[in-house]
Image (tube, rainbow, N blue to C red):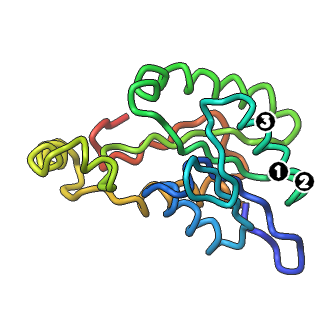
């Protein structure tokens, strides 16, 4: 939701905020008036290893101590194998949270990016592999971090106030639903 003039900016916490997609999301939310806090393992506003419960709890405390609240949470820090293995479970958790928290006015949705041209994805995919995916997409171009960032910024805006429990597929039309 967009920050209203004269009000305190909404606080957006972005895990993986130093990565390609995370950095683009951070920039998009900052441009829409959010106060952003990045969490990442190496370089971030708050250094955090999400694989460690202790580190994660310390980061959550640091966010609340330093910023007073978290209005928007963007989880953008996947490890590849656990991410792929848990994608279905994450969607189930998202939908459960949307139902459980909706009564409190908290909207929970997800963004599912397709193969996105980032430094990390270029270490795992060749140019030919990117081209093969683009060839299967309805939109014949490589996806870039700003594509996903725009979707997240929309979900964090007033325009998405009535959206909950949904998945925005930012995949260039690879999976048409």
Viewer-side residue, 150 vs 36:
36
Q: Quadrant of residue 146?
A: bottom left
Does residue 143 lie above or below 53 as drawn? below
Q: Please state if 153 lies on the left or on the right of 60 as rendered.
A: left
Provide residue 77's location: percent of width, then percent of height. Answer: 53, 42
Looking at the image, do the residues carrying marks 2 and 1 touch, with CB atoms under 8 Å apart?
A: yes
Task: Kindly indicate whether the residue at mark 1 contacts the one at mark 3 (C-beta within 8 angstroms).
Answer: no
First reached walking from the N terminus: tag 2 or tag 3: 3
Q: Residue at x 79, y 63 (%)?
A: 10
Above or below, 49 against 68 in this view is above
Q: Which residue is mark 3?
A: 57
Left or right: residue 85 versus residue 67 is left
Callout 3 secondary element: helix
Residue denoted by label 2:
65
Helix, strand or loop under label 1: helix
Q: CA distance from mark 3 to mark 1?
A: 9 Å
Q: Earlier in the sequence, mark 3 or mark 1?
A: 3
Local crowd at mark 1 within 10 Å, few (<14), some, or many (≥20)? few
* Residue 62, numbered label: 1
Residue in the picture at 43% in, 57% down: 20
Looking at the figure, which quarter contains the C terminus? top left
- Pick whichever, 104 or 19, lies toward us: 19
Which residue is situated farthest in the bottom direction here? 6
Q: Report which quarter residue 157 is drawn in.
A: bottom right
């Amino acid at each position: 939701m967009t920050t209203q003039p004269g009000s305190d900016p909404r606080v957006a916490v972005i895990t993986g905020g130093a990565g390609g997609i995370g950095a683009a999301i951070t920039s998009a939310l900052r441009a829409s008036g959010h106060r952003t806090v990045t969490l990442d393992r190496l370089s971030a506003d708050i250094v955090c290893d999400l694989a460690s419960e202790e580190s994660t709890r310390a980061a959550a405390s640091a966010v609340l101590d330093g910023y007073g609240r978290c209005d928007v949470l963007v989880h953008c820090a996947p490890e590849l194998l656990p991410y792929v293995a848990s994608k279905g479970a994450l969607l189930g958790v998202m939908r459960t949270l949307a139902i459980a928290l909706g009564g409190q006015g908290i909207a929970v949705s997800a963004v599912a990016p397709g193969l996105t041209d980032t430094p990390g994805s270029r270490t795992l995919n060749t140019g030919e592999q990117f081209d093969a995916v683009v060839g299967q997409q309805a939109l014949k171009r490589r996806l870039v971090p700003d594509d996903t960032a725009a979707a997240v910024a929309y979900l964090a805006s007033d325009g998405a106030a009535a959206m909950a429990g949904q998945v925005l597929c930012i995949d260039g039309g690879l999976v048409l639903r």
